[in-house]
Amino acid sequence: MMKFTKQNFVFLVAAIIIYIVDIGVDFWVASKYFCQGQYSCSILILCFRCLSSLITQRFSYEWFKNDWEVTDTGKLKWIFLVHLFQCGIFIRYWFALKYGCQAAFKQKSSGDASETDPSNFIQKQAIDAVTDINMLRVFKTFLETTPQLFVQIYVLMEHDKINFYQYAAIFMSFCGISCSVVDYQISLRKALPDKDEFHGPSKFMYLFYKLLTITSWVLSISLITVLSVRISVILLIFHWVCGFTWTLKQCTTFCKSKKMEYLYRIVVGIILIFTFFNIKGRRTKVCIFIYYAAHTVVTLGILFVYMFWKPALIKKIYFPVLSIITIFSLVLGIIFLVVYYRHFHPTTYCRAWAYSDEVDGVAGEKDRVKTGRFQNFLMP
């Protein structure tokens, strides 16, 4: 069983600080846009924030309800009230800190002991609590951070007055999006006993694969948004419909209730607009090829449309710079993707004798324990 270490605890504390700072930054950015007369951008920033909060709080409460409905029904009323005021994530951080402190500083895990052993039980509680938080962070990343990033890049390209903090905010957003996905990958592999550990080289390859492909796609959509907001909206809706339809076809079973399952599928459809995830842990070579081939075609199409539809826009300084970054990121991202799945995927990297990639089918079998919702969530 994987351990919750002191380093994990430090990262958890840092994550809490970043989360609180992020709330302040959102309101600060919205106020800056409002003071500059960019009211629509200010409203969009806050709307994405509210939408993300509502959905993540809904899922968080539902998970508490599923975990406690038999043993702690009395606490659910207080849990519901806290989530109603959009503060449920802080309860989860509290439990993560509580169990994490015990696991990292007060307990010694015995690798050969059963899951019910007190020390291993605390370890599992800590890992599960952090995994829940990282699952919610994935929702937040693609419901809030990524759409806000579109707004920031759009404002940057549309207005001549550019401040250094805008570049810094955009760069940090790209890094934050990629890191949240990597953190989720790491915690998920700790929570699921049949997953191999995510080692250093694998982390970096996966990070750059996600960072570069997401960067290329976000810049492409931002370029088409400057050209035509209507076309951009239509393109995003089309991608969401495709992602949502594929999710329906996969017959996901993440939630216990049908309403929450459909909400989950809607959210997954939004996530699939920006990056690829394995919905059911099945073979995905064909799907991932189609996904990034489509993104490549659309990206190149956007650049060609720019040149032939409104060539006057090419004279603006941002077009040659962004087009080069877009193509460069796309090519490098796909290279990192291929190398990652060929040589650095945890199954391949940790067990060279395995004949199949874990994303495409589990190589070997381990003793399975109850993994709850983690087994049915998005697989990296």
Image (cartoon, helix red, strand yellow):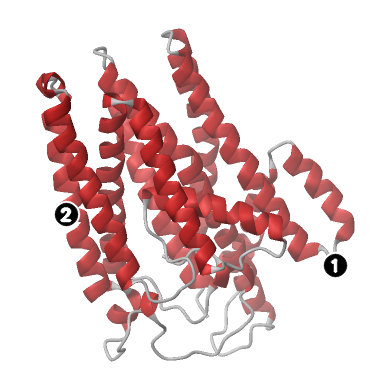
Locate residue 5 relative to residue 82 in the image: left or right. left
The residue sitting at 46% across, 73% down in the picture is 281
Picture quadrant of residue 299: top left
The vertical placement of 148 against 113, above or below, is above
The vertical placement of 137 against 286, above or below, is above
Locate residue 317 relative to residue 17 in the image: left or right. left
What is the crowding at mark 2: few (fewer than 14 residues within 10 Å), some, or many (at least 20)?
some
The residue sitting at 17% across, 30% down in the picture is 306
The residue sitting at 15% across, 53% down in the picture is 331
Q: Which kind of residue does numbered mark 1 sit on?
A: Thr
Picture quadrant of residue 145: top left
Secondary structure state at the residue bearing disc 2: helix
Q: Which kind of residue does numbered mark 2 sit on?
A: Leu
The vertical placement of 301 against 307, above or below, is below
Name the residue furthest right. Answer: 74
Q: Which residue is mark 2?
A: 332
> Residue 15, percent across and down?
50, 47
> Residue 63, percent across and down?
69, 59
Picture quadrant of residue 105: bottom right
Q: Which residue is mark 1?
A: 71
The residue sitting at 62% across, 55% down in the picture is 262
96 or 89: which is nearer to us? 89
- Quarter of the picture containing the C terminus is bottom left
122 or 256: which is nearer to us? 256
Tag 1 or tag 2, which sits nearer the N-term?
1
Locate residue 29 relative to residue 336 in the image: left or right. right
